[in-house]
Image (spheres, rainbow, N blue to C red):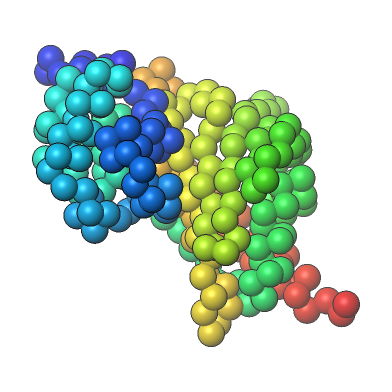
Amino acid sequence: MSTDNGTTRVTGFTFDDLRGVLRKAAGDFDAVDGDIFDVTFAELGFDSLIMLEITAVLESEHRVNDPDDVIEITRTPREVVALVNGASSAGHVDNSVVIDAPYELVWELTNDVPSWPELFSEYASAEVLERDGDTVTFRLTTVPDENGTQWSWVSERRMDKERGTVRAHRVERGPFAYMEIFWEYRTTPQGVHMRWVQDFHLNPQAPLDDAAMEERMNRNTLIQMERIKELVEQRARRPE
């Protein structure tokens, strides 16, 4: 929890936390379980009573001292998560690549977590810890950096092949107050448009701030996407 000009904020408030808030506020509202994070509350059909209930749950269960301000300022669930977490400095990166290969192949190769050390140049190992339907919990370990240091953390990944979306977050957050990841796959005439969005906020003790991490992530994501594009397209051209 952090304090800014006397206003108390929580840190580590995730999309899953907000989804729980919305369920309590809206009851059996089907839209809450969908891919809603960039959909406006108006489009979701949340009326003033539901919005008031959201502020009540934020205050009582998540110690947000000014939930009315949060709701007045924000238009989408993503904006609520960012604002509750200290919003003004939250990190956000959005990158994409078009892969000239069939959708089925792109989905299969990029969502096969155990093979990620072959697909990504940054990972030394990817160990699946648990599977539950389309949800997988796994441990990633990086290759050693220039100082010989390896980093490791546990993440959870929820895949929806029919919608072409993936939601993931770090279970072991390390230097991050939160790290939320969204992948989107869309078929185009040129191939599969694969988009990665990462929303995060670093703890005050982290060696980098959000801006520096944004720069690093943008640089590395482009490298990894180009590598994945090349490898998947090579696989697509390979005879059966």
Q: Quadrant of residue 135?
A: top right
Q: Position of residue 132 (x, y in %)?
A: 68, 40
Quarter that holds the C terminus: bottom right
198 with respect to 138 (left or right): left
Q: Is residue 88 left or right of residue 187?
A: left
Q: Give x and y (percent) for residue 86.
A: 26, 29
Q: Residue 154 lies in what quarter of the image?
A: top right
Residue under the point 55% across and 82% down = 190
Residue appearing at x 52%, y 23% in the figure? 174
Residue visible at 71% across and 47% down in the picture: 113
Q: From the viewer's perspective, tell me whether residue 33 is left or right of residue 24.
A: right
Q: Is residue 85 visible to us here?
A: yes
- The residue sitting at 28% across, 40% down in the picture is 26
Front residue (pair 11, 60): 60
Image x and y of residue 60, in percent:
24, 18
Q: Is residue 172 left or right of residue 114?
A: left
Residue 176, given in percent of the width and then of the height, sits at 45, 28
Image mark count: 0
Judge whether 196 appears above or below 82 on screen. Answer: below
Residue 40 visible, this angle = no
Q: Looking at the image, which residue sits at the far bottom?
A: 189
Q: Image quarter for residue 223?
A: bottom right
Placement of 72 over or under 147, stated as above or below: below
Q: Nearer the viewer, residue 186 or 71?
A: 71
* Quadrant for the N terminus in the image: top left
- Residue at the far front in the pictured view: 28
